[in-house]
Amino acid sequence: MQYISTRGGGEPMTFSEALIEGLARDGGLAVPAEMPEVSPETLESWRALSYAELAAEVIGLFATDIPRADLQRMTRDAYAGFPDEVVPLTPLDGGLTLVGLSEGPTLAFKDMAMQFLGQVLEYQLERSGSVLNILGATSGDTGSAAEHALRGKDRVSVFMLSPKGRMSAFQRAQMFSLDDENIHNIAVEGVFDDCQNLVKRLAGDVVFKQENHLGAVNSINLARITAQVVYYVWAWLRATDESGPRAVSVTVPSGNFGNILSGFYAARLGVPLARLVLATNENNVLDEFFTTGVYRPRAAAETLATSSPSMDISKASNLERFIFELFGRDPERVVAAWAQLDEDGSFDIGSDLPRLSGEFGFASGTSTHADRLATIRQVHDAVGEIIDPHTADGVKVAREHVEDGVPMLVLETAKPQKFAETIREALGIELEYGPEVREMLDAPQHVTTLPDDAEVLAAFIRDRALG
């Protein structure tokens, strides 16, 4: 399996090369040169596998340069700290089913891919005798999941950017309470899109990237996307049987388009998905794109701070991977669209719009703060479950797209404890924290505040990067 750039530059890469490279050298994103496919018979044969065993099979379709025995060891180690049922499915009211993705160490779905990424990065760096300085941006959960997966590793340092004052207190504590020498938390004076732009600017500087051994753990990194494909396969296997409905729909709360892109890849792999429903909050740039065909990211000043902060994103990195497929894998059209975006602030896919809901099966919707509070209350009253505000966004939008005879799955994003203030507002209750969580919340925080300035950030990294 070879990987190419969405913008057509550079030589094809192996999975391991794309893993270390992160952002492609031409500024594009790595995508499979040819999408792997599995037969219905192969899908059926996977029903009896454990989650770790299934992960080795699915990721192995993409990581063909890694021996299968090594993959099996890495996936076993990645999910060893999860409960026995790594991804539980829980029925909700109204015919919905919640796909539980928050059983990992940081209580968020990002752990599902990040725990594997920590394993495979360490494996590849040891195999090559090299080091890597991870530069990432987080709107809330990616940062803590990456840091908890990579803390204490000898060959990796993490430089994680977050928007100052834009995360929940729990999210800040999960990141900033870490005092490992290889973890560097940086609060940027701006919004998430400013952080993401800094990452892309430094990662796009080939000289700086090579001199400082720069890599990525955001969903820019293809390993994140492929590891997330696994739980779509897992959920389909548990939501269907040989005598029942064969296709399911999945609703995905989405900010950076990585999670739902993994669902798109799962569908291309052969998983029968009727609809992929994208759910956004008040920062509804992606909803606008999927309903009008116009992609118009907002400026930093127009990006709202909401009660689902991990989705407070205007410019979705992974949309480029989908646009590449929409444009018939034509890198010239991708480059032209992004050039128009840079010049005009938007682009319009025009006659390709009907293909979004037709050929590709996408739908979308949005929620407000009031919608999320109402949905949290509704789910709690109906089945006794407490869901976080991002998941509530997904449940609200999912209800608008339920079809007779087609199971509707909703991907959970995090435990409600990470957003206690919103839960208090919705339900009037205080969520209980165990002693380990309370200790984390009360611990000293280690973070450096920097301006939205690429040169200042570059100097900070040079002084602390592994060489």
Image (cartoon, rainbow, N blue to C red):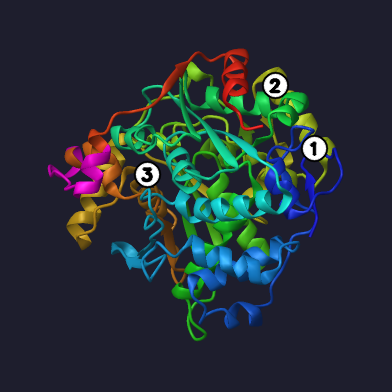
Distance from the alpha carbon under mark 1 to that under mark 2: 15 Å
Q: Which residues are magenta?
A: 425-440
Secondary structure beneath label 2: helix
- The residue that appears at 61% across and 62% down in the rendered structure is 266
Foreground of the two, 342 or 217? 217
Distance from the alpha carbon under mark 3 to that under mark 1: 32 Å
Q: Which of the two labelled residues, at mark 2 and mark 3, occupies the earlier sequence position? A: 2
- Give, as a three-letter code, the residue at label 2: Asp
Q: State the residue position of label 2.
A: 342
Quadrant of the frame with the N terminus? bottom right
Which quarter of the picture shows residue 339?
top right
How many residues crowd around disc 3 within 10 Å: few (fewer than 14), some, or many (20 or more)?
A: many
Secondary structure beneath label 1: loop
- Give, as a three-letter code, the residue at label 1: Arg
Q: State the residue position of label 3.
A: 390
Q: Is residue 290 above or below residue 184?
A: below
Marking on residue 74: none
How many residues crowd around disc 2 within 10 Å: few (fewer than 14), some, or many (20 or more)?
A: few
- Give, as a three-letter code, the residue at label 3: His
Question: Is-magenta flag for residue 437?
Answer: yes
- The residue that appears at 65% across and 28% down in the rendered structure is 200
Q: Nearer the viewer, mark 1 or mark 2?
A: 1
Foreground of the two, 180 or 187? 180
Secondary structure beneath label 3: helix
Rendering coords of residue 204 (x, y %): 72, 28
Q: Which of the two labelled residues, at mark 3 and mark 1, occupies the earlier sequence position? A: 1
Q: State the residue position of label 1.
A: 7
**Can residue 248 be seen here?**
no
